[in-house]
Image: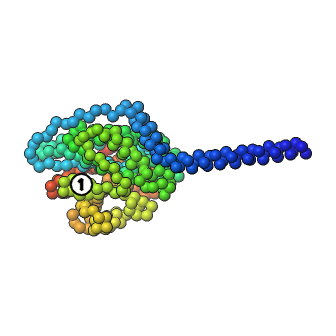
Amino acid sequence: MFEESLETAKLEAEIIELRKSNLTLQAKLIKAKAKVDDLAAATVEAAHNAVIDLGGIGNVTPPSADKRKARELVCLWHLTDWQGGKKTPTYDSTVMVKRVNEFMVKAHKLVLDYRASRPVKHCVIVFGGDMVEGLFNFPTQPYEIDQTLFGQYVTVSKTITEAVQFALTIFEKVTVVAEWGNHGRIAHRGAVPRPDNLDRMCYELARQLLADEKRLTWEDSVNDWQKIEVGNYRAIAIHGDEVGRNGFASPSTIVQHIARWQSGSLDYDFRDAYIGHYHTHSSWSLPNGFGQVYQTGSTESDNRYAQIGLASMAVPSQRMHLIDPIKGRVIAEHKIWLDGE
Protein backbone atom coordinates (compact mmCIF):
# COMPACT_ATOMS: atom_id res chain seq x y z
CA MET A 1 0.00 0.00 0.00
CA PHE A 2 2.79 2.39 0.91
CA GLU A 3 4.63 1.59 -2.34
CA GLU A 4 1.49 2.29 -4.38
CA SER A 5 0.99 5.62 -2.63
CA LEU A 6 4.63 6.51 -3.24
CA GLU A 7 4.29 5.66 -6.93
CA THR A 8 1.12 7.74 -7.20
CA ALA A 9 2.87 10.67 -5.54
CA LYS A 10 5.73 10.39 -8.01
CA LEU A 11 3.34 10.36 -10.96
CA GLU A 12 1.48 13.38 -9.63
CA ALA A 13 4.79 15.21 -9.17
CA GLU A 14 5.79 14.35 -12.75
CA ILE A 15 2.44 15.61 -14.05
CA ILE A 16 2.93 18.87 -12.16
CA GLU A 17 6.41 19.27 -13.65
CA LEU A 18 5.11 18.48 -17.15
CA ARG A 19 2.40 21.09 -16.75
CA LYS A 20 4.97 23.63 -15.60
CA SER A 21 7.17 22.75 -18.57
CA ASN A 22 4.21 23.06 -20.92
CA LEU A 23 3.34 26.48 -19.53
CA THR A 24 6.98 27.54 -19.91
CA LEU A 25 7.05 26.38 -23.53
CA GLN A 26 3.79 28.17 -24.28
CA ALA A 27 5.17 31.37 -22.77
CA LYS A 28 8.32 31.04 -24.88
CA LEU A 29 6.21 30.44 -28.00
CA ILE A 30 4.13 33.55 -27.34
CA LYS A 31 7.29 35.54 -26.75
CA ALA A 32 8.83 34.20 -29.96
CA LYS A 33 5.72 35.09 -31.95
CA ALA A 34 5.91 38.59 -30.53
CA LYS A 35 9.44 38.89 -31.89
CA VAL A 36 8.78 37.84 -35.48
CA ASP A 37 10.52 40.93 -36.83
CA ASP A 38 13.64 40.20 -34.78
CA LEU A 39 13.67 36.59 -35.94
CA ALA A 40 13.20 37.61 -39.56
CA ALA A 41 16.05 40.10 -39.28
CA ALA A 42 18.29 37.42 -37.79
CA THR A 43 17.37 35.07 -40.64
CA VAL A 44 18.20 37.68 -43.26
CA GLU A 45 21.54 38.38 -41.59
CA ALA A 46 22.36 34.66 -41.40
CA ALA A 47 21.46 34.14 -45.06
CA HIS A 48 23.47 37.21 -46.02
CA ASN A 49 26.51 35.72 -44.27
CA ALA A 50 25.87 32.37 -45.95
CA VAL A 51 25.82 34.00 -49.39
CA ILE A 52 29.09 35.77 -48.65
CA ASP A 53 30.58 32.45 -47.49
CA LEU A 54 29.62 30.93 -50.83
CA GLY A 55 32.04 33.25 -52.55
CA GLY A 56 30.79 36.81 -52.25
CA ILE A 57 29.27 38.88 -55.01
CA GLY A 58 32.40 40.22 -56.70
CA ASN A 59 32.80 43.44 -58.64
CA VAL A 60 30.84 44.36 -61.76
CA THR A 61 32.72 45.77 -64.74
CA PRO A 62 30.44 48.07 -66.76
CA PRO A 63 30.28 47.76 -70.56
CA SER A 64 31.70 50.39 -72.88
CA ALA A 65 29.26 53.23 -73.51
CA ASP A 66 27.35 53.03 -76.81
CA LYS A 67 27.47 56.59 -78.23
CA ARG A 68 25.47 55.97 -81.41
CA LYS A 69 22.56 58.34 -82.04
CA ALA A 70 20.16 55.76 -83.49
CA ARG A 71 16.91 55.23 -81.60
CA GLU A 72 17.38 52.73 -78.79
CA LEU A 73 15.66 49.47 -78.10
CA VAL A 74 15.16 48.18 -74.55
CA CYS A 75 15.66 44.53 -73.66
CA LEU A 76 13.23 42.73 -71.32
CA TRP A 77 13.99 39.41 -69.65
CA HIS A 78 11.12 37.52 -68.06
CA LEU A 79 12.74 35.06 -65.65
CA THR A 80 10.26 32.99 -63.71
CA ASP A 81 9.45 29.66 -62.05
CA TRP A 82 12.97 28.50 -61.27
CA GLN A 83 11.57 26.28 -58.48
CA GLY A 84 14.95 26.39 -56.74
CA GLY A 85 15.29 23.35 -54.50
CA LYS A 86 12.93 21.15 -56.52
CA LYS A 87 14.18 17.58 -56.88
CA THR A 88 13.05 15.36 -59.77
CA PRO A 89 14.88 12.74 -61.87
CA THR A 90 16.03 15.50 -64.25
CA TYR A 91 16.03 18.66 -62.12
CA ASP A 92 17.65 20.02 -58.98
CA SER A 93 19.36 23.18 -57.74
CA THR A 94 22.50 22.51 -59.77
CA VAL A 95 20.50 22.11 -62.98
CA MET A 96 18.61 25.31 -62.14
CA VAL A 97 21.83 27.33 -61.95
CA LYS A 98 23.11 25.73 -65.15
CA ARG A 99 19.94 26.64 -67.05
CA VAL A 100 19.87 30.20 -65.74
CA ASN A 101 23.46 30.56 -66.98
CA GLU A 102 22.42 29.06 -70.32
CA PHE A 103 19.74 31.72 -70.62
CA MET A 104 22.29 34.46 -69.95
CA VAL A 105 24.62 33.23 -72.68
CA LYS A 106 21.86 32.86 -75.29
CA ALA A 107 20.23 36.17 -74.39
CA HIS A 108 23.57 37.94 -74.69
CA LYS A 109 24.10 36.56 -78.19
CA LEU A 110 20.68 37.82 -79.24
CA VAL A 111 21.41 41.26 -77.78
CA LEU A 112 24.64 41.43 -79.80
CA ASP A 113 22.67 40.67 -82.97
CA TYR A 114 20.29 43.58 -82.31
CA ARG A 115 23.15 45.89 -81.42
CA ALA A 116 24.54 45.43 -84.91
CA SER A 117 21.93 47.96 -86.06
CA ARG A 118 20.63 49.80 -82.98
CA PRO A 119 21.77 50.59 -79.43
CA VAL A 120 20.43 48.34 -76.66
CA LYS A 121 21.64 49.98 -73.48
CA HIS A 122 18.89 49.19 -70.98
CA CYS A 123 17.59 45.86 -69.68
CA VAL A 124 14.45 45.33 -67.59
CA ILE A 125 14.59 42.05 -65.67
CA VAL A 126 11.15 40.84 -64.61
CA PHE A 127 11.40 38.12 -61.97
CA GLY A 128 8.03 36.38 -62.07
CA GLY A 129 7.87 34.37 -58.85
CA ASP A 130 8.19 30.75 -57.76
CA MET A 131 11.92 31.28 -57.78
CA VAL A 132 11.99 28.84 -54.85
CA GLU A 133 10.26 25.47 -54.58
CA GLY A 134 9.09 26.12 -51.02
CA LEU A 135 7.68 23.54 -48.61
CA PHE A 136 4.01 24.29 -48.00
CA ASN A 137 2.17 23.78 -51.29
CA PHE A 138 1.31 20.06 -51.23
CA PRO A 139 1.77 17.16 -48.79
CA THR A 140 4.63 15.35 -50.56
CA GLN A 141 6.68 18.47 -51.18
CA PRO A 142 9.18 17.92 -48.31
CA TYR A 143 10.16 14.66 -50.04
CA GLU A 144 10.74 16.31 -53.43
CA ILE A 145 13.37 18.91 -52.55
CA ASP A 146 17.14 18.89 -52.45
CA GLN A 147 17.39 21.81 -49.98
CA THR A 148 15.51 23.11 -46.98
CA LEU A 149 13.96 26.58 -47.01
CA PHE A 150 17.21 28.05 -45.73
CA GLY A 151 19.21 26.36 -48.49
CA GLN A 152 16.73 27.48 -51.12
CA TYR A 153 16.94 31.02 -49.76
CA VAL A 154 20.72 31.11 -50.04
CA THR A 155 21.05 29.40 -53.44
CA VAL A 156 18.25 31.30 -55.15
CA SER A 157 19.32 34.66 -53.70
CA LYS A 158 22.85 34.09 -54.97
CA THR A 159 21.62 33.03 -58.42
CA ILE A 160 19.35 36.08 -58.68
CA THR A 161 22.27 38.29 -57.65
CA GLU A 162 24.56 36.75 -60.25
CA ALA A 163 21.93 37.10 -62.98
CA VAL A 164 21.56 40.81 -62.25
CA GLN A 165 25.33 41.19 -62.08
CA PHE A 166 25.69 39.56 -65.49
CA ALA A 167 23.13 41.97 -66.92
CA LEU A 168 25.12 44.88 -65.46
CA THR A 169 28.20 43.71 -67.37
CA ILE A 170 26.43 43.90 -70.75
CA PHE A 171 23.93 46.75 -70.25
CA GLU A 172 24.60 50.32 -69.21
CA LYS A 173 21.43 50.38 -67.12
CA VAL A 174 19.39 47.60 -65.45
CA THR A 175 15.94 47.80 -63.88
CA VAL A 176 14.52 44.95 -61.81
CA VAL A 177 10.81 44.30 -61.38
CA ALA A 178 10.26 41.55 -58.81
CA GLU A 179 6.98 39.64 -58.47
CA TRP A 180 6.51 36.78 -55.97
CA GLY A 181 4.68 33.48 -56.40
CA ASN A 182 2.67 30.88 -54.50
CA HIS A 183 5.63 28.52 -53.91
CA GLY A 184 7.30 31.22 -51.86
CA ARG A 185 4.47 31.07 -49.37
CA ILE A 186 5.67 30.54 -45.80
CA ALA A 187 3.48 28.11 -43.83
CA HIS A 188 0.09 27.00 -45.09
CA ARG A 189 -2.34 29.23 -46.94
CA GLY A 190 -3.62 32.05 -44.76
CA ALA A 191 -1.23 31.39 -41.88
CA VAL A 192 0.91 34.48 -42.56
CA PRO A 193 0.34 37.69 -44.58
CA ARG A 194 0.82 37.19 -48.34
CA PRO A 195 3.75 39.66 -48.61
CA ASP A 196 5.75 37.50 -46.16
CA ASN A 197 6.99 35.39 -49.04
CA LEU A 198 10.29 33.59 -49.56
CA ASP A 199 10.58 34.82 -53.16
CA ARG A 200 10.32 38.37 -51.88
CA MET A 201 12.95 37.66 -49.20
CA CYS A 202 15.32 36.33 -51.88
CA TYR A 203 14.75 39.48 -53.93
CA GLU A 204 15.39 41.69 -50.92
CA LEU A 205 18.64 39.95 -50.04
CA ALA A 206 19.88 40.23 -53.63
CA ARG A 207 18.78 43.87 -53.74
CA GLN A 208 20.75 44.66 -50.58
CA LEU A 209 23.83 42.84 -51.84
CA LEU A 210 23.73 45.03 -54.97
CA ALA A 211 22.75 48.24 -53.18
CA ASP A 212 25.97 50.02 -54.23
CA GLU A 213 25.35 49.50 -57.95
CA LYS A 214 24.49 53.00 -59.21
CA ARG A 215 23.34 51.71 -62.61
CA LEU A 216 20.72 49.44 -61.03
CA THR A 217 17.13 50.43 -60.22
CA TRP A 218 15.28 47.99 -57.98
CA GLU A 219 12.30 48.85 -55.82
CA ASP A 220 10.49 46.52 -53.43
CA SER A 221 6.68 46.31 -53.48
CA VAL A 222 4.16 44.64 -51.19
CA ASN A 223 1.66 44.34 -54.07
CA ASP A 224 1.07 40.94 -55.64
CA TRP A 225 1.18 42.58 -59.08
CA GLN A 226 3.95 44.83 -60.36
CA LYS A 227 4.21 47.76 -62.78
CA ILE A 228 6.55 47.60 -65.78
CA GLU A 229 7.35 51.01 -67.24
CA VAL A 230 9.78 51.44 -70.14
CA GLY A 231 9.48 54.83 -71.81
CA ASN A 232 5.94 54.86 -73.23
CA TYR A 233 5.53 51.11 -72.70
CA ARG A 234 3.28 50.00 -69.84
CA ALA A 235 2.72 46.43 -68.68
CA ILE A 236 2.01 44.47 -65.52
CA ALA A 237 3.68 41.40 -64.04
CA ILE A 238 1.69 38.87 -62.06
CA HIS A 239 2.71 35.38 -61.07
CA GLY A 240 -0.46 33.73 -62.40
CA ASP A 241 -1.99 32.14 -59.29
CA GLU A 242 -3.96 35.36 -58.66
CA VAL A 243 -6.51 34.31 -61.31
CA GLY A 244 -8.86 31.37 -60.81
CA ARG A 245 -9.74 29.10 -57.94
CA ASN A 246 -6.88 27.28 -56.17
CA GLY A 247 -4.38 28.95 -58.49
CA PHE A 248 -5.64 27.45 -61.78
CA ALA A 249 -7.48 29.12 -64.64
CA SER A 250 -7.97 28.44 -68.34
CA PRO A 251 -6.33 30.76 -70.89
CA SER A 252 -9.71 32.34 -71.70
CA THR A 253 -10.35 33.05 -68.01
CA ILE A 254 -6.88 34.58 -67.63
CA VAL A 255 -7.46 36.85 -70.64
CA GLN A 256 -10.92 37.90 -69.43
CA HIS A 257 -9.62 38.65 -65.94
CA ILE A 258 -6.70 40.74 -67.19
CA ALA A 259 -9.01 42.53 -69.64
CA ARG A 260 -11.20 43.60 -66.71
CA TRP A 261 -8.11 44.96 -64.96
CA GLN A 262 -7.19 46.73 -68.18
CA SER A 263 -10.64 48.30 -68.45
CA GLY A 264 -10.03 50.23 -65.25
CA SER A 265 -10.53 48.01 -62.20
CA LEU A 266 -6.77 47.89 -61.56
CA ASP A 267 -6.38 51.70 -61.76
CA TYR A 268 -3.29 51.41 -63.95
CA ASP A 269 -3.20 51.98 -67.69
CA PHE A 270 -1.21 49.12 -69.22
CA ARG A 271 -0.86 47.41 -72.59
CA ASP A 272 0.54 43.93 -71.86
CA ALA A 273 0.68 41.42 -69.02
CA TYR A 274 3.45 38.95 -68.14
CA ILE A 275 2.64 35.77 -66.20
CA GLY A 276 4.34 32.52 -65.24
CA HIS A 277 2.98 29.83 -62.92
CA TYR A 278 1.96 27.33 -65.62
CA HIS A 279 5.48 26.42 -66.82
CA THR A 280 4.44 26.73 -70.49
CA HIS A 281 5.25 29.38 -73.08
CA SER A 282 2.23 30.99 -74.74
CA SER A 283 0.68 34.34 -75.65
CA TRP A 284 -2.89 35.52 -76.16
CA SER A 285 -4.36 38.73 -77.50
CA LEU A 286 -6.35 40.99 -75.21
CA PRO A 287 -9.80 42.12 -76.40
CA ASN A 288 -8.72 45.72 -77.11
CA GLY A 289 -6.67 44.47 -80.08
CA PHE A 290 -3.41 46.03 -78.87
CA GLY A 291 -2.32 44.20 -75.74
CA GLN A 292 -1.03 40.70 -75.18
CA VAL A 293 -0.81 38.29 -72.28
CA TYR A 294 2.68 36.78 -72.36
CA GLN A 295 2.99 33.50 -70.46
CA THR A 296 6.54 32.30 -69.85
CA GLY A 297 7.87 28.81 -69.16
CA SER A 298 10.11 27.46 -66.40
CA THR A 299 13.69 26.29 -66.01
CA GLU A 300 12.23 23.14 -64.46
CA SER A 301 11.75 19.80 -66.22
CA ASP A 302 10.00 16.52 -65.39
CA ASN A 303 7.19 17.95 -63.24
CA ARG A 304 5.10 14.97 -62.08
CA TYR A 305 2.28 17.16 -60.78
CA ALA A 306 1.85 18.77 -64.20
CA GLN A 307 2.13 15.44 -66.00
CA ILE A 308 -0.45 13.65 -63.85
CA GLY A 309 -2.72 16.41 -62.59
CA LEU A 310 -2.78 18.64 -65.67
CA ALA A 311 -1.59 16.27 -68.41
CA SER A 312 0.91 18.98 -69.30
CA MET A 313 4.64 19.07 -69.91
CA ALA A 314 7.04 21.60 -71.39
CA VAL A 315 10.68 21.91 -72.42
CA PRO A 316 12.45 24.36 -70.06
CA SER A 317 12.53 27.91 -71.39
CA GLN A 318 12.43 31.61 -70.46
CA ARG A 319 11.49 34.77 -72.38
CA MET A 320 13.28 37.76 -73.89
CA HIS A 321 11.64 40.76 -75.59
CA LEU A 322 12.86 43.85 -77.39
CA ILE A 323 10.76 46.93 -76.71
CA ASP A 324 10.45 50.18 -78.63
CA PRO A 325 10.16 52.68 -75.76
CA ILE A 326 8.91 55.47 -78.04
CA LYS A 327 6.09 53.53 -79.70
CA GLY A 328 5.47 51.76 -76.42
CA ARG A 329 5.22 48.20 -77.69
CA VAL A 330 7.07 44.92 -78.03
CA ILE A 331 8.74 44.63 -81.43
CA ALA A 332 10.43 41.23 -81.02
CA GLU A 333 9.71 38.12 -78.94
CA HIS A 334 12.12 35.30 -78.21
CA LYS A 335 11.50 31.97 -76.53
CA ILE A 336 14.89 30.88 -75.24
CA TRP A 337 15.16 27.12 -74.91
CA LEU A 338 17.15 25.82 -71.94
CA ASP A 339 17.58 22.16 -72.85
CA GLY A 340 21.27 22.43 -73.71
CA GLU A 341 20.69 22.67 -77.48
Residue type at mark 1 is Glu
Residue 190 visible in the shown view: yes
Closer-to-camera residue (251/72): 72
Residue visible at 50% across and 47% down in the picture: 35
Image quadrant occupied by the N terminus: top right
How many other residues sit within 10 Å of disc 1, few (<14), some (14-19) or many (≥20)? some
Colour basis: rainbow
Task: Name the residue carrying label 1.
Answer: 229
Measured as percent of width and height from the top left, residue 246 is found at 45, 61
Image height of 329 relative to 111, above or below: below
Asked if residue 107 shows in the view, the reply is: no
x, y (%) of residue 49? Answer: 42, 35
In the image, residue 259 lies at what x, y percent? Answer: 29, 66
Q: SS at mark 1?
A: strand
Q: Quadrant of residue 56?
A: top left
Residue 4: x %, y % from top left: 87, 45
Which quadrant of the view contains residue 60? top left
User: How many numbered tags mark residues here?
Assistant: 1
Q: Where 184 falls versus 210 (above or below)?
A: below
Q: Quadrant of the C terminus?
A: top left
Q: Is residue 155 left or right of residue 71?
A: right
Question: Is 333 rendered above or below residue 269?
Answer: above
Residue occupying the point 15% across, 38% down: 65
Q: Residue furthest right?
A: 1
Could you tell me which residue is drawn at 53 percent across and 52 percent down? 139
Residue drawn at (41%, 31%), measured in percent from left and top?
53
